[in-house]
Image (cartoon, coloured by chain):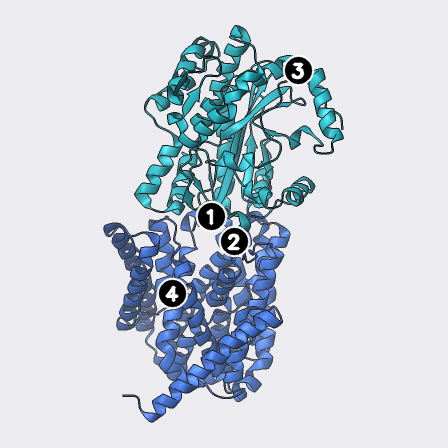
Amino acid sequence: MMGHTQWLFFMRIALSFLLASLAGEGVCRLVKMPRITGYALAGLLLGPLGLDWVDGDDLPDFRFLVELTLTLLLFELGVRVSLRWLKYNPWVIASSLLESVATFIAVFGVLMGTGSEVKSALSIAVIAMGTSPVIVLRMVTEMRAQGQVTQRLLVLCGLNTVYSVVCFYLIMGWFQGAFHGQWFMALFHSFYLLVGSLGMGLVLALSFKLLRRMFELSDEQSAPVLFGLLLLLQALLVALELPVFLAPLLGGVLAKHFDPRPHLWPRHFGTAGSILTIILFMMTGSLLTRNAFVVGVGTAMIVVLARFVAKGLGVLLLGPVSGLNLRQSLVLGVALIPMAEIPLVELMDMRALYPQMGVRILPIVFSMMNVLEIVGPMAVQWGLIRSQEFQEKSS
Amino acid sequence: MKLPPFTSSRPLTLGVELELQLVNTYDYDLVDSTTDLLRLLKKKGKDWDVKPEITQGMVEMATGICVSHADVFEQLDEIRQGIVECADRLDIGVCGGGTHAFQHWSERRIYDTPRFDQLSSLYGYLAKQFTIFGQHVHVGCDNADEALTLLHLLSGFIPHFIALSASSPFVQGNDTGFHSARLNSVFSFPLSGRAPLIETWDSFGEYFESMMATGIVKSMKDFYWDIRPKPEYGTIEVRVMDTPLTIEKAAQIAAFIQSLTRYLTLERPYAPRETDYLVYTFNRFQACRFGYEGVYVNPRNHEHRSLSEEILETLNKIEPHAIALKADGACAALRREVSNANSDVGWLRQQHAQTKSLAEVVQRQCARWRA
């Protein structure tokens, strides 16, 4: 039975969704900007800064969908990270580590310089390391991009997402230890989260391979099976209280490693992916309240700038030895700008655990996230056009 | 531009060119990484001859001047390893095969050089359709007239070359039923086919100049003949082969052409004549369509037989020459293939039947190319 309020809520979300998707099309056709920039703008418009149709309190209702979106996308991203390649070309890992560490140091430094306290600065610096898999994958899919810049963009994004999530949990463990004085438990817990995620990723990859072999599934037939496995994984992760995001990403990496056959299934998830992206962007827009915006946007802009410089320099420095030319390295640095939405859910959890810290860092993070959801897709679009790796639509 | 003089070169020397496919490693479609691969290869500082081809996603490797089958194989092997190493650093795959199984021609991008741009604007979509991968074998000749005679003598063996090298059953995602569907793309070019039967370089020069006067051609490169002279190198260039799936096979085919040339030069079993060409396109079609199973019509005695029989008999005839050139091992390998009805096409279709996925076929092609 759908109650009166539920009906209204449903209507409000449905209209918002329609508006966001139309905004995407409009932005794409009128000003030739990426569709997802339109989704992000619509998200802001629908959120508390604009019409206030969708707000942060709705997030719990959508948590499942948001997590599902990210699970699918992260698995897809993982499949694009080839361990064999990293072995053949270790400079790719080196440039990934350099850009991430540089980002961490730059953001941490800037925040300390502008008077943040250590814990907030650490949290934000760790979050800032990650590039948005959602934006990167949507743009690569939409522009049908392929080539060296695209490939490295995906791999660096996958790697810095791993660093970012791992460091986030380590830091949270440290906070907890410091807070409760239970160091051993806190460290053990972080360890459990990371090893557990790796283990679940392994289980996912192996069961996918096994099912594919047992039923001789062709690529197309394997898409629904995979979807089922990812849903199951998500349920298990929740049951085991493991982070939702590390396991699918690592699972994708391992799945490709154990079974280097072609994986075309992302094509089959294409439309579903773009629908879920709209919902995700509506949610990030909904988190940015007027108050948070006023408090956070100044610092956020400085951090965004520092992050951009650090990522750009990091990639520029080691791009050439890893096999790119200078122009490609430069373009890659720009395309890494979009910031990960991954910590969204974790941050909500953190706010519940440490309300005071939430107050300090959430306005900055939410402001950054929204700014970069608008600018980020344009940066990726620019990069893929400059590197000539996009494919014109064939009619 | 006049027809350049024919440089004399040592008879029976060989040069082999192979056009290769560059693919990504997640869905195995062609990938625009030619520029990146060439940049990395250049950094290796070797004097390997590796060049871009008309679209991104193609690359051409070539040996220097070789004297024997072993020489060809060693040179191809060294360049192959160099290319594979660089490709690994870029996370791309390299493979043989006359066509990419499922690429879409409309997604190809012309490699940016003045010549390729000009070809693209002249031929339109044909230029992108020309994303096909062939093996070219140069054979050295000491004088121009001899080269032209040899060209026409070798023309009778075009079906043999096609059937032995065929590796392009799949085009744009479908099984065409052909063994070499690649050549169908070549035939759509206006100046493709056979060279006119002219056996002296002077007359050939006159022919070339009258063609130039019509404004249709500017250089020898504008002729897409199955075999054409390359005066700058002092060679004739056999161009009908698909790039085989392995360099072993590519080297064997070069050895076969070399032995056949020695046979034709020393024994001179007959002189070329225009009526030899009556069956030319029929035989060529049969080889493209059916491979070894195709019908071969002998233009001299009008006998019809299977191409496999014909190839085996040719291998018998040239055996002493193969032994003299140390190409007998290579020819024996080809004989086994024909006798057992093994071919690259058969292998490709078998992989497709097993995997039901053309992307996986390409993946296996890459693995075969490395091995």
Marks 1, 4 in one chain: no
Amino acid type of the residue that numbered disc 3 sits on in the rendered structure: Ala
- Say if mark 2 contacts mark 1, CB within 8 Å: yes
Q: How many residues crowd around disc 2 within 10 Å: few (fewer than 14), some, or many (20 or more)?
A: many
- The residue that disc 3 covers is B144
Q: How many neighbours does mark 3 have within 10 angstroms: few (below 14), some (14-19), or many (20 or more)?
A: many
Q: Which mark is residue A72?
A: 4
Where does the image place residue A176, in percent across and percent down from the top left? Answer: 37, 77
**Residue A229, quarter of picture:** bottom left
Q: Is residue A384 above or below residue B290?
A: below
The image quadrant where one finds the C terminus of chain A is: bottom right
- Residue type pointed to by label 1: Asp
Q: Colour of chain B?
A: cyan
Question: How far apart are labels 3 and 4 at the CA level?
Answer: 65 Å
- Image point (35%, 75%), residue name: A64
- Residue to which mark 1 is pinned: B29
Q: Is residue A5 above or below residue B253?
A: below
Q: Residue at x 37, y 67 (%)?
A: A71
Mark 4 or mark 2, which has the lower sequence index? 4
The residue mark sitting in front, 1 or 4, is: 1
Q: Which residue is mark 2?
A: A146
> Mark 3 near mark 4, Cβ–Cβ under 8 Å?
no
Provide residue B218's location: percent of width, then percent of height.
72, 32
Q: Colour of chain A?
A: blue
Q: Residue at x 50, y 78 (%)?
A: A20
- Report the label total: 4
